[in-house]
Image: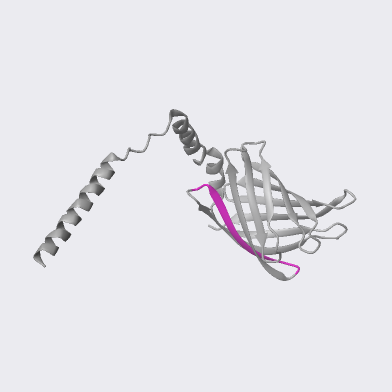
Amino acid sequence: MKNRGLLLVALTIGLVGSAVVGLRAQKAPAAPSQEMQAMMEAHRKAIQPGPQHLDLMRLLGEYTTKDTFYMPGAEAPVISDGAATIKSEMGERFLVEHNNGAYMGEPYAGLRIYGFNNGSKQYEGVWTYSASTSVMSLSGTTKDDGKSIDFTANFKDDTTGQAMSLAVTLKMLDPDHFQVELKSTMPNGSPGPRVVTTYTRKI
């Protein structure tokens, strides 16, 4: 039994020694090439928030909202009240808005995400709300350093599956107010329904 125990100890020491020698024999991983290091550094810089993201962060806060619906041929617009909360996500790279309101007496809740793509140099967004199963994607630019952003919004209609497009403009009015306008076009090219939402910061 004593000899057997000594044999096990010897085998264990031998295996550990072999493992250590094997690890020492392995080559250390090669350092990234200069080209790879340059690519990694360029990527690191590209994903950092920039001045456009900082401008978007001005919208953070709690708001009351007023939706004004303009229907072609209607004598007067339909007006309803709501609320919105806008927060930042992903290290101040994106705005996330949760809103609620009513249309034609039916309540709804909405979700909107805004950001700026450093690669495409365009503002991007995603919208959806509780009265739909579709997701609307937005892509836009500014001509006045972010005071207003003109988006083209695309989605597929819930009922027909037909591709649809809207014009969306986000416009800063002052530090405590901004507007979002949605404009549609009828099949014959004439103006369709239009919605203007005015946001007023809660003080």
Q: In the image as oriented, which residue stretches furthest toward the top?
A: 34
Residue found at the far right of this picture: 188
Q: How is the image coloured?
A: one colour
Q: Nearer the viewer, residue 38 or 55?
A: 38
Q: Mostly what secondary structure, the magenta segment? A: strand
Residue at 57 percent of width and 47 percent of height: 175
Q: Which residue is drawn at 19% across and 56% down?
A: 11
Task: Tell how many labels.
Answer: 0
Residue 63 rendering spot, x and y as whole percentages = 58, 58
- For the N terminus, give its image quadrant: bottom left
Q: Is residue 9 left or right of residue 96?
A: left
Residue 128, picture quadrant: bottom right
Instruction: Kindly identify the residue that appears in the image at 62 percent across and 56 percent down.
Output: 112
* Location of residue 7 with respect to 92 vertically, above or below: below
Question: In the image, 67: left or right of 20?
Answer: right
In the rendered structure, does residue 95 fall within the stretch colored magenta? yes
**Could you tell me residue 16's position as x and y percent?**
22, 51
Residue 184 placement (x, y as % from top left): 79, 52
Verify whether residue 139 appears in magenta: no
Q: Give the range drawn in magenta.
A: 92-104
Give the percent coordinates (x, y) of residue 103: 73, 66
